[in-house]
Image: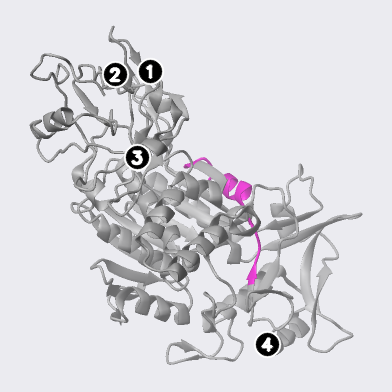
Amino acid sequence: MLRHLARKLRASGPVTVAEYMREALTNPGQVRRGRAGPGGAGYYTRRGGVGESGDFITSPEISQVFGELIGIWYISEWMAMGKPSTFQLVELGPGRGTLTEDILRVFKQLASVLSKCDVSVHLVEVSPKLSEIQAVMLTGGKVQPNPEDESAYMKGISKTGIPIFWYRDIQDVPPGYSFYLAHEFFDALPIHKFQRTEKGWREVLVDIDPEVPDQLRFVLSPSRTPATQNFIQPEETRDHVEVCPEAGVIVQRLASRIEKDGGAALVADYGHDGTKTDTFRGFRNHKLHDVLSAPGTADLTADVDFSYLRKMAQGKTATLGPIKQREFLKNMGIDLRLQVLLQNSGDTATREQLLHSYDMLMNPEKMGDCFNFFALLPHHRLVHPDKKDKPKSKSPLPPVAGFNELLLNSANARLRSDWHQGLANGFLPALSYVKSNSRGSENRTVMSAAIVLANKVHHRVSDDLKTVGGAALHHTSNLNHRRLIEHGTTGAVCVHPRAPKPWKRWLAALPKAGSDELQVAQQSPKALGPRCREQSAPTKQLGSLQACGALLSLPLPRKPYTSKSGKAQGL
């Protein structure tokens, strides 16, 4: 690769950093029988440097929890958008396929939720080496060329029975309702670098060092280049700027697709919000590597400028973020998922590995603050569309998981038993709790409920109460320590662990409403906390009863249970 670049530079002069990165990372080299050969081949073309044995390691390679929570994010958004009958999962730059495999495992565990949805996977991958690794990871190697469809160069069926297709460009992916995923994708796209000088802005170029044969160096353009005129804004205050035009083009395409066909895009990457300067660097064997030394043998990367991505969406979609990885994963319930795995692990080594992985993902000094999450969503996902003939709906839209606390508004959607049974290994939904007083006036309060459907796992419900507007469940159960359950129509019930047996028998005798069931949520007294003993505080705990697999809304009696003696049974 170095000899190839040296010949090119001697013949045509300095090149932009973007062109250098493109050559060093994705040059196909000598192609033989459809495979890239070694001569001049780029890093991604001939290597699969992901994982502990490679040159860099990614979050999915560290812990399965990362991919599982990403899978939950997509299902959460799919439900919030009305459960379309079909969707495509499109991943850009899937690496070894580990993240896709974790997501597909979640889809399998929630098969009953997705039973009426036609799901397919579409991978955008330019590296022949990595596509082979992905095929083995996802299908066991059972793939075939796809000559009848020139857009997809390979196809197969995942181990979970979902069709998978491979493409070289996002434009080749067929249109349709799609969820897009770009994890550590944009940071590897070619960037242009610019430096402020006394003569104005100049572009940073790559050239041959005249004093050292076959060695590269950075130089400044003698005058403004076309890229300088196109990408440097008059209001720019930094002295060094990096711009990734390819990232802007891809975001434009994603935004256009989402605007036209629906769906969402989730981006996870190193990045900043228009504040950093010189972030161009290389990695080899998990160590920093000189970006100009031995090109083609190291991964080259630069932090993603999320402010630029937001601008390039051009208002076609709404944007959320960036939000730090540790905040996103915490909102998605990584702490609870970790405790489920720790409890179910059978040996000390496994538990230590889980804790180490958690630390890598969440520690601010490691990946916790370095990585950020960013999302593209249809405008109607965040704001009710204006309607000329009908008044604007006042019902609150479900918050976006990860960027807010993970909530599910029970005023708009009932919690189904298959959803919770699928989450029995610790994935988190949440409960919208609406409290009403005896006069019937509503205090619409959403309680973020950390519901853990796994044996012997208990966690406190968030104390953070948020007032929201919109439709509410009237006369929902008012559950306070040592108080009666007030009359109600529909609601989800959480019973204090000291509830007497007659009360539990009454619950067991309640008629079932279709597939709906009621879970008596139990909790250890020590974990309840002092607020549960206050007369005015709503129950703060939701846990799990080993014999139950669902927490659902269902018709409640008009009167509390009364014992044979005629006395109402309190909690």
Disc 1 designates what residue?
Answer: 535
Secondary-structure class at tag 1: loop
Residue at 57% of width from left, 77% of height from top?
A: 26
Residue type, numbered disc 1? Gln
Q: Secondary structure at mark 3?
A: loop
| Separation of marks 4 and 2 at Cα, in angstroms | 80 Å
Residue closest to the eye, 538 or 302:
538
Segment tinted magenta in the rendering = 300-318
Q: Earlier in the sequence, mark 3 or mark 2?
A: 2
Residue at the extreme front of the image, as rendered: 565
Q: Which residue is mark 4?
A: 4
Q: CA distance from mark 3 to mark 2?
A: 19 Å
Quarter of the image with the N terminus in it:
bottom right
Above or below residue 245? Residue 406 is: above
Residue beneath label 2, please? 483
Q: Is residue 130 left or right of residue 52?
A: left
Q: Secondary structure at mark 2?
A: loop
Name the kind of residue labelled 4 in the image: His
Q: Where's residue 249, x and y in %? A: 54, 56
Tell me the mark number nearer the camera, choosing from 4 and 2.
Answer: 2
Name the mark nearer the viewer: 4 or 1: 1
Residue at point 20%, 25% (across, down)? 490
Where residue 392 appears, as percent x and y from the top left, is 35, 21
Q: Is residue 305 magenta?
A: yes
Crowding at mark 4 (Cα within 10 Å: few <14, some 14-19, many 20+): few
In the visual, does 263 lie left or right of 301? left
- Judge from the rendering whether residue 271 lies leftward or rightward of residue 526; answer left or right: right
Query: What amino acid does circle 3 point to?
Result: Ser
Q: Which mark is residue 331?
A: none
Residue matched to label 3: 524
Number of numbered tags placed on the structure image? 4
